[in-house]
């Protein structure tokens, strides 16, 4: 697998900074999945002790891994990758921002 760093757009960088730079507080993000459907996740950004295994999108700047409040079958926090290039809405710190 090629792990060369892959950059993204300025808009996606700004969205990434909003999600990763809010001090670990919860946020809600709405984005368009690869299959074209809309998805909304509520979670936060940060590292969890149970995080093991390779993150297959870590070298892609456009992805942010969101930690969900739910747990998997082993009791570990669930995580989902969000493509910041397809984000349509973020709610954090009581403010909602919409993107085109």
Image (cartoon, rainbow, N blue to C red):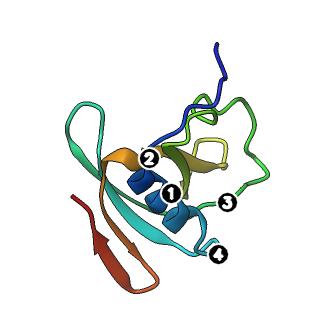
> Mark 4 sits on what residue?
23
Q: Kindly give the residue lying farthest to the right in the view shown.
A: 49
> Mark 2 sits on what residue?
82
Circle nearer the viewer, 1 or 3:
1
Is 41 on the left or on the right of 58, as rendered?
A: left
> Mark 3 sits on what residue?
46
Q: Residue at x 64, y 13 (%)?
A: 1
Mark 4 residue crowding within 10 angstroms, few (<14) / some (14–19) / many (20+): few
**Considering only order in the chain, which callout, 3 or 2, is on the residue closer to the N terminus?**
3
**Considering only order in the chain, which callout, 3 or 1, is on the residue closer to the N terminus?**
1
Q: Quadrant of residue 59?
A: top right
**Considering only order in the chain, which callout, 4 or 1, is on the residue closer to the N terminus?**
1
Q: Kindly give the residue lying farthest to the bottom in the view shown.
A: 94
Mark 2 residue crowding within 10 angstroms, few (<14) / some (14–19) / many (20+): many
Q: Determine the secondary structure under disc 1.
A: helix
Distance between mark 1 and mark 4 Cα atoms: 13 Å
Q: Determine the secondary structure under disc 4.
A: loop
Q: Kindly give the residue lying farthest to the front in the view shown.
A: 10
Kindly indicate whether the residue at mark 4 contacts the one at mark 3 (C-beta within 8 angstroms): no
Is 32 on the left or on the right of 5, as rendered?
A: left
Distance between mark 2 and mark 4 Cα atoms: 18 Å
Distance between mark 2 and mark 3 Cα atoms: 14 Å
Q: Which quadrant of the figure contains the C terminus? A: bottom left
The residue lying toward the viewer, choosing from 65 and 11, is: 11
**Considering only order in the chain, which callout, 4 or 2, is on the residue closer to the N terminus?**
4
The residue lying toward the viewer, choosing from 36 and 53, is: 36
Is 26 on the left or on the right of 41, as rendered?
A: right
Q: Determine the secondary structure under disc 2.
A: strand
Q: Residue at x 51, y 57 (%)?
A: 16
Q: Position of residue 64 (x, y in %)?
A: 53, 49
Mark 3 residue crowding within 10 angstroms, few (<14) / some (14–19) / many (20+): few
Q: Does 2 sit above or below residue 50?
A: above
């Amino acid at each position: 697998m090629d792990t060369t760093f892959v950059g993204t757009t300025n808009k996606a960088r700004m969205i990434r900074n909003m999600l990763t730079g809010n001090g670990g507080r919860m946020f809600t993000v709405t984005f368009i999945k690869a299959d074209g459907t809309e998805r909304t996740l509520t979670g936060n950004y940060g590292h969890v002790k149970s995080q093991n295994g390779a993150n297959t999108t870590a070298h892609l700047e456009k992805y942010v891994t969101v930690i969900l409040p739910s747990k998997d079958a082993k009791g570990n926090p669930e995580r989902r990758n969000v493509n910041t290039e397809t984000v349509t809405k973020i709610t954090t710190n009581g403010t909602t921002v919409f993107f085109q």
